[in-house]
Image: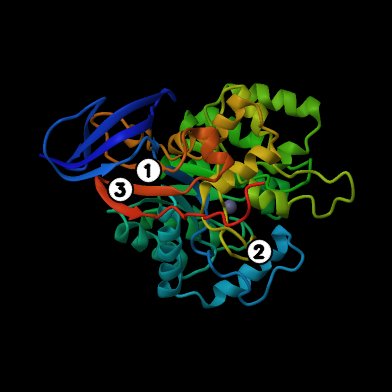
Amino acid sequence: MYDLLLRQCRLLQTDRTIAEVDIAIKERVIVDIAPKITGNTKLELDIQGKLVSPPFVESHIHLDSALTAGEPRWNQSGTLFEGIEIWRERKQNISLEDVKQRAIATLKQQATQGVLFVRSHADVSETSLTALQALLEVRQEVKDWITLQVVAFPQDGIYSEPQNDLLLEKALDMGADAVGGIPHYELTREDGVKSVHRIFELAQKYDRLVDIHCDEIDDDQSRFLEVVAACASRTGLGSRVTASHTTAFGSYNNAYAGKLLGFLRRTQINFIANPLINITLQGRTDTYPKRRGVTRVKELWQQGANVSFGHDCIQDPWYSLGTGNMLDVAFMGLHVCQMTGTAEIDACYDMVTWNGAKTLNVEDRYGIEIGKPSNLIVLNACDRYDAIRRRAIVEYVISQGKLLVKTEIPRTIWHGSCS
Ligand SMILES: [Zn+2]
């Protein structure tokens, strides 16, 4: 007796080919994938030839600041730095319940749209560590339907205040999954370099992943990515390391960028670009031509680096828009990075699915294969290109073998004349 049987699936397989199959689930595990499965089941869904994909992965978001846009005031300049100022005011009065309620509301919004794996940063620059404590509690409370990773993120820098270094270490002690940083926002270049070394030291001491907000600035002299790459190589942490944003990479001269790409080829580090937010945050001091403010996604992808796309913010001081829809993210990434070739469009889909799973180091439990946990989504689309082009609706979300969400497809009736 199966728990769930999905009939007539258009399955997007791990090798990215499509197979027309049935999928059987029992005790939270995918137990069979075959053209025609017989046997009794508790629940059967007719998928009607729609696309069945592994769930979306949100590899970079800030759940602690989500849904606070306009509090206490709107970011009128649209810059990263006004955003940081506003958040500094807003976080004076955050409480455990405030953060938890907004984080869970955001996670529900994401899951409704097919996201079942999320990496969130938690600001650990305030002495009470309320945001971190709240997200750690949320991680536990939602674990039956969504996987949440929490990064200890020193938003104001590790060396800007004497206590920040201790707070970061305390956050790891409390159970953060990854250690973060913001070297380009440290007071000096030397502090920035020192902060990267400190992050790697802590990652090794506590055996945690690394995810650094790195060079998120238009300054072509912001060069902490090379430090991250060197530390990743020397420590052997490789694929456990992620460089988020790296927007300055888009501003480096080609001679330096070419050299850096060569160095990066020797590391296994992951990259996360956040196209929705960086296309709006960056380039604010430019006249024309105005830069795009996104890292060199296409070049990194072409040389085989693991690149994923993140949403970064949903209605917060840095980005007042957003719904959590990862197809919006892939759609914007495709445009900003000019990835319009057929393989490139498909790659943009992978950047919000498989590549994100690799960044989160959850590949062993990701993908629709016999023996893997049964997390999958059904899209009202026929392939990856169709899903991105129409930002297809996620009709079903199956999380850990259970039907978590069903969304009705809107129906349009044409009342005009035919001519
Ligand atoms: Zn971020």
Q: Quadrant of residue 130?
A: bottom left
Q: Which residue is mark 2?
A: 84
Say if residue 322 shows up in the picture.
yes
Question: Residue at the location (40% across, 54% down)?
Answer: 111
Density class for disc 1 (Cα within 10 Å; few <14, some 14-19, many ≥20) is: many
Q: Position of residue 278 (x, y in %)?
A: 68, 49
Q: Residue furthest right?
A: 288
Say if residue 245 shows up in the picture.
no
Question: Residue at the location (51% across, 61% down)?
Answer: 124
Between marks 1 and 3 in the image, the one whose residue lies nearer the viewer: 1
Is 196 above or below relative to 77? above
Q: Which residue is mark 3?
A: 399
Q: Amino acid at mark 2?
A: Ile
Q: Is residue 223 left or right of residue 416?
A: right
Question: Residue at the location (69% across, 46% down)?
Answer: 190
Please state which of residues 413 and 134 is positioned toward the viewer in this rendering.
413
Q: Amino acid at mark 1?
A: Ile
Which of the two labelled residues, at mark 2 and mark 3, occupies the earlier sequence position?
A: 2
Tell me the CA gap for discs 2 and 1.
Answer: 35 Å
Q: Which residue is mark 1?
A: 377
Question: Residue at the location (73% across, 62% down)?
Answer: 78
